Image (cartoon, rainbow, N blue to C red):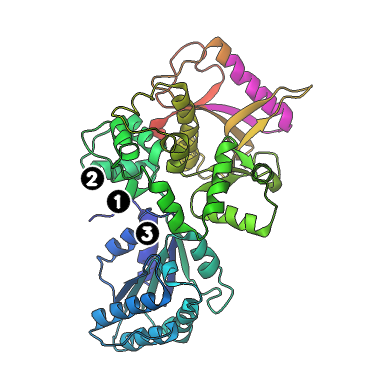
Amino acid sequence: MKIIGRQPEQDRIREIMNNDKPAFVALYGRRRVGKTFLIKEYFNQKFTFYATGLANSNTQKQLLNFTLFINNQFSASYEPPKSWLECFSFLQKELSKIEGDKILFLDELPWFDTKKSDFMTGLDFFWNSWASSQSGLKLFVCGSAASWMINKLIRNKGGLYNRITHRFKIEPFTLAETETLFKSQGINLDRYQIINIYMTIGGIPFYLEQVQKGLSAAQNIEKICFSPSGQLRNEFQFVFSSLFNNSEKHEKLLRAVFLLGNRATRDQIIKHLGWESSGDFSLKLNELEESGFLKSYVPTGTNKNKKIYVIADYYTLFYFKFIEHSSKYAEGVWTSMIDSGNTYAWAGLAFEQVCWDHTVNIKRKLGIEGVYSETSTWSKSADAEIGGTQIDLVIDRKDRIINLFEIKYSTSPFTITKEYDLKLRTKQSIFKEATKTRKSVFLAMITTYGITPNEYAKSIIQNELTMDDLF
């Protein structure tokens, strides 16, 4: 199969392979994001050695599993050992017989590391005592449990400390990659329909592959997310249980952010849950971020203690909002909700997130991709002196320009009325007064279908972007 997108990742792998130095390459990212597919397809599934861990298994079975991979791929006849040290010594012995470059791929690495198994001791021994000195040896490892990959491997404080030579966080597809994937499968949807699917399930390749040609975005969403046989009807619990040990707290934390309006500070989350501020809480926040479920940012003009957390995973947000509370399935359930206020409110927030996730495209459209900038949001509560307002997206540039973005999701061109024009001017004025900025402030709009031409369309708007600019 042809790899869709992933060009930067492919370029980095090519650089690694063109260098004779041994490499220990760690890939991590959200489950179903395509880590295994990328490595298998890049190398056409031709490895000197390949093994994958067993889900929810014990040490004895993991050792048997790994030994079977060794025996099958090297025509050997080892008996399952009692330790990972011995198991990796089998692998080293067989690899020593092979001259030239060696490509190894250990998939779902965290699953090998069962309780009290000493798997990391074996991996440490294998890399440090032998593999790290073998010219042309490339060890690729990956795992969906991003917290394990980060905390126990990449940030390892033992024998594997600072041994990872390259790390890849595999991100979900962009809108452009999603469009390319659909075209490769003969799915001809316009960009508005593609964005609606993306706002629902995000850029997770496995989810996007469930989309069927010949069906509209609404029909596909209903089939995938609401029908009893839909792949994503009950996906949420499966994903969490496979990512985190004792995942109940991670789920509660994520739900707290949702219940707080999908915009919450650390202190607000702690207060909502009634938990203590602790290192364990910080760890779980970090694990949810590393796994792609949460995203954080520091609002313009504040310090890092005011960091805001939002749900970054589109499917999770859609699941909490609609799927989880859907009643017994009836045909047409999603299409019947499309025009409701509840759905429009969700779509507005989801479209804002899409814009946030494609700020690279926005900067390119503005011609500022080469200018250092910081991306954030901004809000202010009303007080006795200055009114309150919220800015959807702020790009604070080093060239002394600040771009403020108003983001609007609609089914047709958006019309700026006299009243809305005044609202925009007030937002800009409040921002200038509250932040005391000396930079020039430009106001821009991002809409799905553009702005209706009228006397207010260009009165204060400096830049106009549409959904096409996000692809």
Examine the rendered structure and indicate whether residue 316 appears above or below residue 349: below
Q: Which residue is mark 3?
A: 35
Examine the rendered structure and indicate whether residue 81 appears above or below residue 443: below
Q: Say which of marks 2 and 3 sits in front.
A: 3
Q: Can I make out residue 328 in this image?
A: yes
The reply to whether callout 2 and callout 1 are in contact (CB within 8 Å) is yes
Q: Would you identify the image quadrant in which residue 21 lies? A: bottom left
Quadrant of image for the C terminus: top left
The answer for how far apart the CA atoms under marks 2 and 3 are is 20 Å
Q: Residues within 10 Å of mark 3 (few under 14, many from 20)?
A: many
Q: Would you identify the image quadrant in which residue 361 lies? A: top left
Q: Amino acid at mark 1?
A: Ile
Q: Which residue is mark 1?
A: 4
Q: Residue at x 51, y 69 (%)?
A: 153
Which residue range is magenta in the image? Answer: 421-444
The answer for how far apart the CA atoms under marks 2 and 1 are is 9 Å
Q: Is residue 366 left or right of residue 329?
A: right
Callout 1: SS: loop
On whether residue 469 falls in the magenta region, the answer is: no
Q: Which residue is mark 2?
A: 184
Q: Residue at x 46, y 44 (%)?
A: 313
Say which mark, if any, is on residue 319.
Answer: none
Callout 2: SS: helix
Q: Main secondary structure of the magenta part?
A: helix
